[in-house]
């Protein structure tokens, strides 16, 4: 009974926040609605007894990704409150992409067999660790290599374009 | 003659009955409260002990679970508020002692203990200002986003065996996650205030916290690795049996991991020398420049709750938690004493060290603290091979290292107390020669 009430509260909050992301025009407001949605989904994980997944959701998405997102928005905005509004051509593309994504998600939800063998509710962290380094070692390593590549790409993009302190700059004139 | 009169403040909502109550009963109640302070203090102490005993022995089996939860949550909330109030008073006294001034002395009875209560009354009465160009909903929401996670962190903090609201098997990560949400409130406040000082403070907070979270988590992981559990209760339980079995003295890498964790935790709760987000010398008051009244108090409460939470984490993981220095005396009291000591060290550091620049803060984290904690993490993983019970020779080696580190820790503590006693004995002695220089014309 109480679980149902809490579930509908959290799920409704997540859906409402998702709709609010689409409807709001200020980027910062959008970021905070996104955070609301992520926290609500984390709450759903807690409700299901998956403490580890819920905590990681909050620690990584809310504490790391969302903070960096808000931070990036603040640093890159020209005006103090940047507005976002898609153009005519963009709406078409967005509609196509959104429709394909929605279709893919709906189909995958409908065609997955959800009756998996349930995990024991005890020490979920140890079980996850054993599975990650045992059965799913290959995908785990693949994902870490992917993350490494993404990090290298970010470092490459963020490097200074002009060499700021080369030896040829400081050779001739000494400004003191 | 022209005098400007402020328009009379109209109190609305919840603050109205509080102000009316304070206006009506303050002049009578406060002198009485100060007159019988010691009696009230001891009565409250006896009442709390009796209440805890009653709930623990008789009511807890009878109570339905939601009432039990309600009682514990209200108790934790009261604990957080008391920690914040005593912390604010303690901050003033410590700063006064360190900088050779008095701190609150003339008002508020014995050493000004009631000063924080008076502050609270003052802040409730103050006008709730919101700047005209502020982002109103975010501005009003920000203090709650800062305070509520700081309180939520206490839900999985064990004060002793059985003295915990929810014994989660990922308790450590839960506390870290809650402390990580707190930064959002600060960034929200800085953005919504629509003031350049607030925005600078919020941006400093963002980059500082996201960077220092990594060394903080890695130092804790080094300890988690040697125990093999993320549950705070389990982490405290393995350190039973004397000061030499505390994780701090288990291996040399954990000994240093404690100090790196402590430095990173100073940065993560915005304490000096890392208090750049509210650097008063540069940014007026940083992210809470535009806040007044009770919303300002909520930021303060969040800071002090966060200070105690990170100290409690250090206590549970490195300093044995509720276990006494001698075996068999485990009690929640030890936990509170050790955590309070660490909070006091935070204040000590704040009033001793000067503030460093923001680029120095980032430099210290990324170039020195982060590689060092990575080294500690790798070293602590390798130490697990040494600590293997299958090889008695290595076991003997590990025991020698453990007792050596324990002796070192005891020596440091002894030196600290000896220094404190020396300073107290010579407390009236001036540093250097006293200079007597008459002012011209005196």
Image (tube, helix red, strand yellow):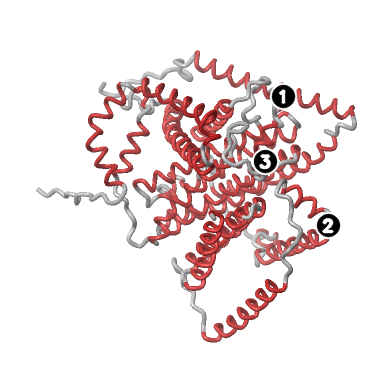
Which chain does the residue under circle 2 lie in?
A
To the question of a shared chain for discs 3 and 1, the answer is: yes
What residue sits 65% from the left and 53% below the top?
A56
Single out the residue that lies furthest toward the left.
B1
Asked if the residue under mark 2 is in contact with the one under mark 1, i.e. CB atoms within 8 Å, the reply is no
Decide which of B281, B336 is in the foreground and name it: B336
Which residue was labeled with disc 2?
A135
The secondary element bearing badge 3 is classed as loop
Q: CA distance from mark 3 to mark 2?
A: 25 Å
Image quarter of the C terminus of chain B: top left
Decide which of B158, A83 is in the foreground and name it: B158
To the question of a shared chain for discs 3 and 2, the answer is: no
Single out the residue that lies furthest toward the front.
B62
Which residue was labeled with disc 3?
B231
What residue sits 63% from the left and 24% below the top?
B330
Which residue was labeled with disc 1?
B244
Which quarter of the figure has residue B415?
A: top right
Decide which of B78, B434 is in the foreground and name it: B78
Q: CA distance from mark 3 to mark 1?
A: 21 Å
Which chain does the residue under circle 3 lie in?
B
Callout 1 crowding tier (Cα within 10 Å): few <14, some 14–19, many ≥20: many
- Indicate which disc residue A89 carries: none
Which quarter of the figure has residue B397?
A: top right
Percent x, y of residue B137: 40, 60
The secondary element bearing badge 1 is classed as helix
Q: Is residue B216 visible?
A: no
Q: CA distance from mark 1 to mark 2?
A: 39 Å
Which chain does the residue under circle 1 lie in?
B
Question: What is the tally of numbered marks visible in this picture?
Answer: 3
Callout 3 crowding tier (Cα within 10 Å): few <14, some 14–19, many ≥20: many
């Amino acid at each position: 009974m109480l679980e149902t009430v809490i579930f509908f509260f959290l799920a409704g909050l997540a859906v409402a926040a998702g709709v609010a992301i689409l409807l709001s025009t200020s980027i910062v407001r959008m970021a905070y609605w996104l955070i609301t949605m992520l926290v609500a989904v984390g709450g759903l994980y807690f409700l299901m007894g998956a403490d580890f997944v819920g905590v990681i959701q909050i620690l990584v998405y809310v504490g790391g990704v969302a903070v960096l997102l808000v931070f990036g928005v603040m640093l890159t905005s020209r005006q103090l409150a940047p507005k976002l509004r898609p153009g005519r051509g963009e709406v078409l593309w967005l509609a196509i992409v959104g429709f394909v994504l929605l279709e893919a998600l709906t189909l995958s939800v409908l065609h997955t067999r959800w009756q998996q063998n349930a995990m024991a509710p005890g020490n979920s962290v140890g079980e996850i660790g054993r599975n990650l380094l045992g059965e799913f070692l290959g995908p785990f390593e693949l994902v870490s290599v992917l993350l490494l590549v993404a990090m290298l790409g970010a470092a490459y993009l963020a490097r200074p374009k002009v060499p700021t302190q080369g030896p040829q700059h400081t050779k001739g004139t000494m400004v003191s | 003659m022209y005098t400007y009169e402020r328009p009379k403040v109209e109190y609305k909502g919840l603050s109205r009955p509080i102000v009316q109550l304070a206006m009506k009963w303050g002049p009578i109640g406060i002198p009485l409260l100060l007159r019988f302070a010691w009696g009230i203090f001891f009565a409250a102490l006896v009442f709390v002990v009796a209440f805890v005993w009653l709930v623990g022995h008789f009511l807890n089996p009878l109570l339905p679970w939601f009432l039990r939860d309600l009682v514990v949550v209200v108790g934790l909330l009261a604990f957080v508020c008391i920690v914040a109030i005593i912390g604010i008073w303690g901050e003033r006294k410590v700063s006064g002692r360190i900088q050779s001034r008095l701190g609150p002395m003339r008002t508020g009875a014995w050493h000004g203990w009631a000063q924080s209560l008076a502050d609270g009354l003052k802040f409730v009465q103050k006008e709730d200002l919101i700047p005209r160009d502020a982002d109103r909903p975010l501005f009003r929401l920000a203090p709650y986003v800062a305070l509520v996670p700081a309180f939520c962190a206490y839900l999985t903090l064990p004060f002793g065996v059985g003295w915990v609201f929810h014994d989660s098997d990922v308790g450590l990560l839960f506390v870290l996650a809650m402390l990580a949400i707190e930064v959002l409130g600060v960034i929200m406040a800085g953005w919504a205030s629509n003031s350049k000082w607030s925005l600078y403070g919020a941006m400093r907070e963002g980059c500082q916290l996201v960077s220092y979270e990594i060394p903080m988590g890695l130092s804790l992981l080094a300890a988690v690795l040697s125990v093999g559990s993320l549950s705070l209760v389990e982490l405290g339980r393995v350190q039973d049996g004397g000061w030499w079995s505390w994780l701090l003295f288990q291996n040399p890498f954990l000994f240093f991991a404690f100090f790196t964790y402590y430095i990173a935790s100073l940065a993560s709760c915005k304490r000096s020398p890392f208090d750049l987000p509210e650097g008063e010398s540069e940014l007026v008051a940083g992210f809470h420049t535009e806040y007044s009244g009770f919303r300002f108090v909520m930021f303060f409460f969040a800071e002090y709750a966060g200070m105690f939470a990170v100290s409690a984490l250090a206590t549970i993981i490195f300093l044995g938690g509720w276990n006494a220095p001698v075996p068999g005396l485990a009690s929640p009291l030890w936990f509170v004493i050790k955590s309070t000591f660490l909070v006091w060290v935070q204040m000590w550091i704040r009033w001793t060290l000067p503030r460093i620049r923001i680029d120095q803060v980032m430099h210290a984290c990324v170039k020195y603290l982060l590689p060092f904690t990575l080294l500690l993490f790798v070293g602590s993983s390798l130490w697990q091979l040494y600590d293997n019970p299958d090889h008695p020779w290595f076991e003997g080696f590990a025991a020698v290292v453990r007792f050596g580190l324990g002796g070192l820790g005891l020596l440091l503590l002894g030196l600290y107390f000896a220094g404190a006693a020396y300073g107290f004995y010579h407390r009236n002695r001036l540093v250097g020669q006293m200079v007597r220089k008459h002012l011209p014309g005196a």
